[in-house]
Image: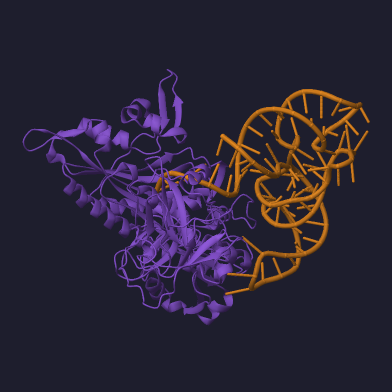
Amino acid sequence: MRVSKFPLNTLKEVPSDAEVVSHQLMLRSGMIRKLGAGLYTWLPLGLRILRKAEAIVREEMNQAGALEILMPSVQPAELWQESGRWEQYGPELLRMHDRHNREFCYGPTHEEVITDLVRKQVRSYKELPLNLYQIQTKFRDEIRPRFGIMRSREFIMKDAYSFHETAACLEQTYADMYQAYSQIFSRMGLKFRAVDADTGSIGGNASHEFHVLADSGEDAIAYCETSDYAANVELAPLLAVAEIALSAEAAVMTEVSTPAAKTIEQVSASLNVTAADCVKTLLVKAEDGGLIALLLRGDHELNTLKAEKLEGVLAPLSFAEEDDIKALIDCPPGFIGPLAISCPILADYSLIQQQDFVCGANKEGFHLTHVNWTRDLPRPTFADLRNIEIGDPSPDGQGTIKICRGIEVGHIFQLGKKYSERLDANVLDQNGKKTTLTMGCYGIGVSRVVAATIEQNFDDHGICWPPALAPFQISILPMKMEKSDKVRSYCEQLYNDLIQQGVEVLIDDRKARPGIMFADHDLIGIPHRLVVSEQNLEKGVLEYKSRSDEDSREIAVNTLMDELSKILNSN
RNA sequence: CGGGGCAUAGCGCAGCCUGGUAGCGCAUCUGCUUUGGGAGCAGAGGGUCAGAGGUUCGAAUCCUCUUGCCCCGACCA
């Protein structure tokens, strides 16, 4: 391609509403332009990249045995009413009427349509398993679209849905999709992790999110460096530890006056201990209308997701009102402790080995020091109550936890029978009996992958595309071409030769100064660059630089093709 | 949806407080000089100041309403 026929439309200044790097660079490089909130046009440059991502997804899905289809983006309301989601989905579903005043929505996802297709089309267990996918435009009327393509309202998604007679069969396809997803993101050259996800209200056995790792990611991920373990920070469980015996010389429990100390910081400061030496007591509402005390180490944070799943705790989690506390114990918040309290107590696992700790005395203005389990109060029930932290043991027992940030680009899910039951999708089994289909679904935010790739691959000069997604593999930058026939004819020849070999090459045939060329090609992130100048040609060399290297090197003209094929094939 | 903010040329902004009929930088076009990291000089084009209403002799500027967009919260590929 020639720059003269493929306008770059680059911007030196960043539009003021672009917050994140990918959004800024996509606008500056001329990949996209905004039409409205969460609505973007893909310009020629951006579309090349999007198409590359799609092609990789398509190839790997086909490879894994999925079949491509294309469903309408506009869907009749009846199907959504049948599944119950017309009411459930809420305002994120863009609804509309046609000229006959029939109700429709713009598809945010396609479980209903695909289930309808399959229930009408598939009659026999012999046609299963079946895995169908599409790459298509979705619309979700997000409350707050932001970060450009990263969270837009209209976006490109690959969504696949599989149908099975048995759960075992679903598990097999699920495993195949897990593999295919890993293959897709590896081929794209991305650093990513498959993360255990909450199966939530939908149920089912397993769900994994695929996250591209980037500092700007919205999700915190706890992962283990020495194993495959990875999970959302809120979901990563902590394991119980063994009890340890109290040492004989432990000091006697003492009541101390702490009139001004209500928070953990104040308490630890006034008693000259660390926050980790303190135990904090949180009172939350119980299902039976009473209260439950939750004990945490002073430096830990309560994980509400975990807490509200515990037996007896009211969900959604709500803290005790002042009146409730008064009814339970005559003590203001700030001095509450687990001794002689008449409600059930749940303590975090990290407190199993806690000794000699500080806690509230249940008496205004006083705390207790040198408190120990068994000796001073009975051991409470222990449970997993807090967020996992850096350095905690990995739940799979294989090492310690680190935390990084990620951008969710894919999600695979064992759906089970949720939709097939609602929509009555079944087949006849071997015995001629009706069996409800078991389903899985598998999504990739293809347009989001493009943005996430930038979040992971950029520098001060612009985007650094992994070769698999780069809009072009190599740039030819001729220096002073209009003054030098030698440069011109050499570049033209080289350009044609590379095209012959099927290399995606971009020649900058503008009458532009070198600085403009360098800046533009760096900004749009072409992985390889050849600079051709008259002086170098006379020496029989030209200059090569990889986008990711600091410095360039010379390549002799007569070995150029060999060198280039080495460089391009090493990707 | 709640809280905050913005709307002036393709992009980034000034002008508004204190009304007098719109300006700067980048980009675009022309010419000359430049030519290895977003050049210099000279010139040109481009704005119904988001829209509607009001106040006024006169409104980008003051008032009212409307619309669009952005940021902070819960959701998601």
Residue B30 point in image, percent of width and height: 72, 53
Outermost residue, left side: A431
Instruction: Report which colour depicts chain B.
Output: orange
Q: Residue at x 43, y 51 (%)?
A: A304
Q: Residue at x 46, y 36 (%)?
A: A92
Residue A195 point in image, percent of width and height: 35, 57
Whether A66 is drawn above or below A543: the answer is above
Location of residue B49 (image quadrant): top right
Q: Is residue A261 visible?
A: yes
Q: Residue at x 10, y 37 (%)?
A: A429
What colouring does the structure picture have? by chain
Q: Is residue A488 visible?
A: no
Residue A219 point in image, percent of width and height: 45, 55
Instruction: Report which colour depicts chain A.
Output: purple
Q: Nearer the viewer, residue A233 or A187?
A: A233
Residue A190 lies left or right of residue A508; in this view the side is: left
Residue A245 lies left or right of residue B65; in this view the side is: left
Residue A26 lies left or right of residue B9; in this view the side is: left
Q: Nearer the viewer, residue A330 or A499?
A: A330
Outermost residue, top side: A100
Location of residue A523 (image quadrant): bottom right
Q: Nearer the viewer, residue A551 or A127?
A: A127
Q: Nearer the viewer, residue A211 or A540?
A: A211
